[in-house]
Image (cartoon, rainbow, N blue to C red):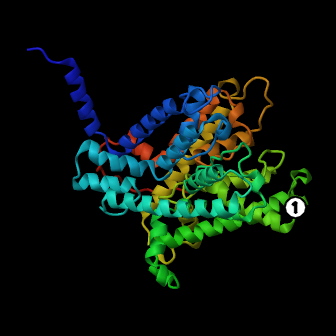
Amino acid sequence: MSTNPVGSRLAGLRRWRQQLTVPQFTVVTGALVILGGTFVLASPLCSSDDVGLWQALFTVASAITVTGLSIIVVERDLTLLGQVVLAGLIITGGLGLMAITTFLQGFVQGRSGLRQRLDKGRALDEFGVGGIGPTFHSILLTATCVMGLGTVVLYAFGFTDIDNPLRRLWASMFHVISAYNNAGFGLWANSLERYRDNTVVNAVIAVMIVFGGIGWRVVNDLWVNRLRLQRLRRLSLHTRLVIRTTVALILLGCIGLLVTENFGYEANGMGALSIVQQLRITLFQSITTRTAGFNTIPLSSDTITDAGLLLMIVLMFIGASPGGTGGGVKTTTFAILMGATRSTLEGRHDVLLHRRVIPAATVLRAVGVTLASLLFVVLMALLLGIGVTAGERPGYADYSFLEKLFTCVSAFGTVGLDLGLTANLNRWGQLVLMVGMFVGRIGILLLLSAVYAHRPQQRVGYPREDLYV
């Protein structure tokens, strides 16, 4: 009896698809979306002749991972249709690649048992067994309302120097989409430098970045308790921790950049500005450095001190909050590590945050995420530092290791700030950045879950023994 080889292969593919876990499905779907988006963006309808498959691949990878690193100029190299496609890719990645893929998996696999619902909820950063559909709909509704309001304000009071109403509307919409999704893509080559002194543009973009970065769960918690915000204890521990850590990092980043740039190079131009201008620039840069990647001042080793670049690297590595549209190791991870350090110094056995004991498993997860992320960034920097394999193109000036490290952290943290290095790397170097962007957006833990999904957990107990630390 003969068998149909095509039917057998389709059946095998169907079985393989149904056996995929949520982490594996997320990784595969993300890669397929990037591949499909590359061919669309490289088509003549979407881009000019200067944009080939490689340029399209890098741009789509940066958009899906909401990074913002770019080797093209969006307004010059992409048609209006291409810009719309790019905005759609940013929304796809920003509103949650994990949320979208787990939402789609319910239709693809057709299984909705308790175990799958728990797995999906975990991938969406949800506690419990709540359904994906209602949560995803709430995320879309919140994002639509916030981005719609931001677009109206930018159109009416921000980009007033753009005379064409349609161009102004599209510029407002595109930059709000990019800011809310923490992507950092701008239509213009110099980002938002010409709006350095425009308070409305700075404020709207900053608010969009913060709202997208703190995550839907925090926004929803604030909305539900909007009439009782005078009693902060009604808010969840997660919300309180995210808000306080976010505000602290913004203020520390602003003050730190004020100090490093005023006591740094005389040629960087910061010292010649008024205190109001300096506060506006450093506050905006502190907000955008952790998540988004916009800039209102030129960024290079000639305009920013080494101390300032190092501070920005730290902010980029910490990143946004869980469930938000940004990357990094997350603000809650940073807060847990600070709490663990304090508990160690005070001789306590438990980690306390706001009079709550943090489970040991959560502390270990925070340590694992941070260490794995740090090792991955070091590996990226090593690959960019081995010369011809992933270095600069011949004829370009050499970049310092600090600049390469800055770019690696910017890619892994899905920030998108660039010191001019990205476009001058050869394709091996740009491939390193693409892999870093993808891993940073998917997340170290989710990626490891996809790799080690089928390894059975050992149930063997071992004797305890202490070590000197």
Where 49 falls versus 242 (above or below)? Answer: above
Task: Answer left or right for 412 relative to 421.
Answer: left
Give percent across and percent down for residue 227: 47, 83
User: Residue drawn at (47%, 47%), measured in percent from left and top?
Assistant: 92
Give percent across and percent down for residue 323: 47, 58
User: Residue drawn at (83%, 49%), measured in percent from left and top?
Assistant: 303
Q: Is residue 466 visible?
A: no
Where 394 falls versus 437 (above or below)? Answer: above
Q: Quadrant of the N terminus?
A: top left
Where 78 falls versus 225 (above or below)? Answer: above
Task: Answer left or right for 100 relative to 4.
Answer: right
Give percent across and percent down for residue 365: 46, 56
Task: Answer left or right for 137 relative to 349.
Answer: left
Q: In the current view of this chain or complex, which residue is farthest to the left?
A: 1
The answer to which of 11 and 321 lies nearer the viewer is 11
Which picture quadrant has residue 210?
bottom right
Q: In the current view of this chain or complex, which residue is farthest to the top?
A: 2
User: Residue drawn at (66%, 33%), measured in percent from left and top?
Assistant: 384
Where 83 falls versus 264 (above or below)? Answer: above
Task: Answer left or right for 463 relative to 438.
Answer: left
Give percent across and percent down for residue 165: 65, 53
Which picture quadrant has residue 31?
top left
The answer to which of 231 and 360 lies nearer the viewer is 231
Residue that mark 1 sits on: 273
Q: Quadrant of the C terminus?
A: bottom right
Q: The residue under label 1 is which amino acid type?
A: Leu
Q: Is residue 408 visible?
A: yes
Kind of element beneath mark 1: loop
Graded by Cα atoms within 10 Å as few (under 14), some (14 to 19) or many (20 or more), the crowding at tag 1 reads few
Q: How many marks?
A: 1
